[in-house]
Image (cartoon, helix red, strand yellow):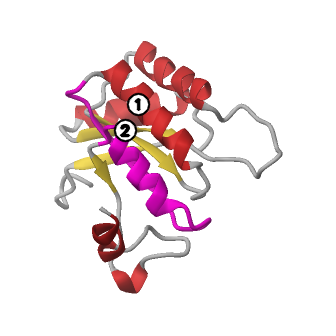
Amino acid sequence: MFKKHGTTTIRNFDALNDVNNLIYSGKSINNHGLKHEVVVTMMDLPPGCTGAHDVAFYERKLRKLLDSGLPFDSICFKDASGTANPNKVYETIKMARKLLGGDMHIRLHTHETAGVSVAAYLAALDAGADGIDLANTPVSGGTSQPDILTMLHAT
């Protein structure tokens, strides 16, 4: 149905970073001649909390994707909570660029929820990301992406 209605790229993600949940859908996307953008889901924890969501964690998830043999055309690091620390974003994108090489399209998707999206996007671009997701003024900010014009001014 996606192809029938003109969609060319499908972003495929599992909120818990379970690669096994991406395999069937990823193969279906490719089998129907669509571009497959696979996702590594990101987040951050409040200050003072410790957890596994560091660059090494995202590298393990990315390596698991690569080891799975799952075909994909691009990769998106998706911070659906809008909480990822810009320094962590920078280091994660640098790690991914080194691991995937210069030809792989790397994108960051985040939300304005915690007010760090513009800083996160600047960090991602500085680290070698090829793309970011933005929204038009009437629907930008808050739980959406940052505004196009705001990002234009920031860059």
Spot occupied by residue 13 in the image (x, y as percentages of width and height)? 47, 42
Q: Amino acid at mark 2?
A: Ala
Q: Nearer the viewer, residue 52 or 17?
A: 52
Residue 135 to residue 129: above or below: below
Asked whether 154 falls inside the magenta stretch, the response is no
Residue most toward the top? 67
| Mark 2 surroundings within 10 Å by alpha-carbon count, few (fewer than 14), some (14 through 19), many (20 or more) | some
Indicate the quadrant containing the C terminus: top left, top right, bottom left or bottom right: bottom left
Query: Relative to 21, is 145 above or below?
Result: below
Percent x, y of residue 153: 30, 71
* Marker count (numbered): 2
Give how far apart the Cα atoms at labels 1 and 2 are.
Answer: 5 Å
Is residue 121 within the magenta segment? yes
Q: Mark 1 belongs to which amino acid?
A: Lys
Q: Is residue 25 left or right of residue 42?
A: left
Secondary structure of the residue carrying tag 1 is helix
- Marked residue nearer the N-terminal end (1 or 2): 1
- SS state under label 2: helix
Image point (48%, 70%), residue name: 144
Q: Residue at x 62, y 65 (%)?
A: 114
Give the vertical position of 52 relative to 86 (above or below).
Answer: above
Residue 149 appears left or right of 76: left
Residue 9, percent from left and from top: 25, 47
Q: Which residue is mark 1?
A: 94
Q: Which residue is mark 2?
A: 127
Which residue shows up at 41% across the image and 81% down it? 139
Which image quadrant: the N terminus?
Answer: bottom left
Q: Is residue 39 above or below residue 62?
A: below
Q: Quadrant of residue 103?
A: top left
Question: Which segment is the magenta one?
Answer: 102-129
Disc 1 to disc 2: CB gap under 8 Å? yes
